[in-house]
């Protein structure tokens, strides 16, 4: 197997263990947040900041209550943006992983594909947005296309990195056991690459909203992008910040969900889960032997 050195490595780890446990870490983060909000609020009230440019936290909280409860107009726009982002993320990840697998299995295809992938990644998303709107129209399709383009690169690079990162000693072991190429791929390369692949998927999910919002800023009838643009043009900055915080929160929640899935799927990276899995397999084996 030949190897490739990707130009960018998206394999990152976020969310390590905190000293003092989850409760202690949560309390520390809340205290830091409260201090920041207090300083922010006092800076606006004492004239050190311009409420028009950077609204007070209390005004943002009131706007959150207004757009979610009193008016309730944010729910529909959130759903539109969420749908565009998730469909685009799914398409981008499927294409990225599929091309990466094909590139790993064929050296010729990898050498042919690499310069075009670099060109696509080097193209600014904001510049290609109007072109996609022209190609796919003003509806949902252009937003999905841009979200897919944004989400494509991280799964592609991380999948190639993971699949080509298998140690030669592992290959030799599988060959000595008479494993076929299909068995090597599914039982060695895929399990070895899963941590890196999942890191790319987490990055793709986190950036999906960005791609959908950029397309909505260019042209849209609904969605969080057009809603925030309307608030900004009317100088309703507290509501604009409330919309921005909503998108940020949803992106954070999706990222954390991906981390939980990552933790469960890659059970062999956690000693406690590994012991539970081993015990389950041992009980299943004993039951099968007795029957």
Image: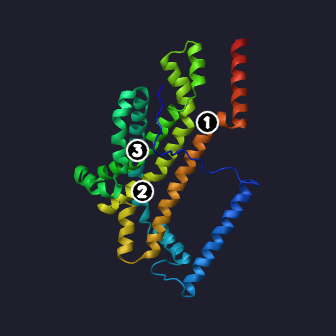
Residue 48 higher or lower than 114, as above or below = below
x, y percent for residue 46: 57, 88
The residue where tag 2 is placed is: 210
Under circle 1, the secondary element is loop
Residue located at (46% from left, 47% from top):
204
Under circle 2, the secondary element is helix
**Left or right: 32 in relation to 58:** right
Under circle 3, the secondary element is helix
Residue located at (38% from left, 66% from top):
227
Residue 21 higher or lower than 110, as above or below = below
x, y percent for residue 256: 57, 50
The residue where tag 3 is placed is: 152
**CA separation, marks 3 and 1?**
23 Å
| Foreground of the two, 155 or 40 | 155
Residue located at (56% from left, 12% from top):
178
Is the C-beta separation of discs 3 and 1 under 8 Å? no
- The disc label shown at residue 266, or none: 1
| Foreground of the two, 163 or 275 | 163
x, y percent for residue 279: 73, 27
Q: Residues within 10 Å of mark 3 (few under 14, many from 20)?
A: many
Q: Earlier in the sequence, mark 1 or mark 2?
A: 2
Residue 248 higher or lower than 39, as above or below = above
């Amino acid at each position: 197997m030949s190897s490739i050195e990707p130009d960018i490595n998206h394999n990152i780890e976020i969310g390590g263990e905190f000293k003092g446990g989850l409760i202690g870490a949560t309390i520390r983060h809340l205290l830091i947040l409260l201090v920041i909000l207090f300083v922010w609020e006092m800076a606006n009230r004492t004239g050190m900041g311009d409420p028009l440019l950077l609204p007070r936290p209390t005004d943002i909280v009131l706007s959150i209550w207004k757009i979610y409860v009193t008016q309730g107009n944010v729910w529909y726009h959130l759903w539109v943006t969420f749908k565009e982002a998730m469909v685009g993320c799914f398409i981008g990840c499927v294409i990225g992983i599929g091309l990466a697998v094909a590139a790993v299995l064929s050296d010729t295809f990898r050498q042919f594909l690499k310069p075009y992938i670099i060109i696509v990644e080097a193209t600014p998303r904001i510049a290609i947005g109007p072109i996609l709107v022209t190609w796919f129209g003003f509806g949902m399709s252009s937003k999905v296309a841009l979200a897919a383009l944004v989400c494509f690169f991280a799964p592609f690079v991380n999948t190639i990195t993971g699949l080509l990162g298998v140690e030669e000693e592992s290959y030799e072991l599988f060959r000595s056991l008479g494993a076929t190429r299909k068995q090597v791929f599914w039982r060695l390369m895929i399990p070895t690459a899963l941590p890196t692949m999942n890191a790319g998927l987490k990055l793709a999910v986190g950036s999906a909203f960005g791609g959908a919002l950029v397309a909505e800023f260019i042209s849209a009838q609904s969605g969080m992008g057009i809603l925030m643009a309307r608030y900004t043009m009317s100088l309703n900055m507290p509501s604009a910040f409330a919309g921005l915080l909503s998108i940020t929160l949803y992106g954070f929640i999706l990222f954390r969900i991906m981390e939980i899935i990552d933790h469960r799927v890659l059970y062999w990276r956690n000693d406690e889960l590994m012991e539970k899995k081993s015990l389950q397999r041992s009980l299943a084996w004993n039951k099968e032997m007795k029957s």
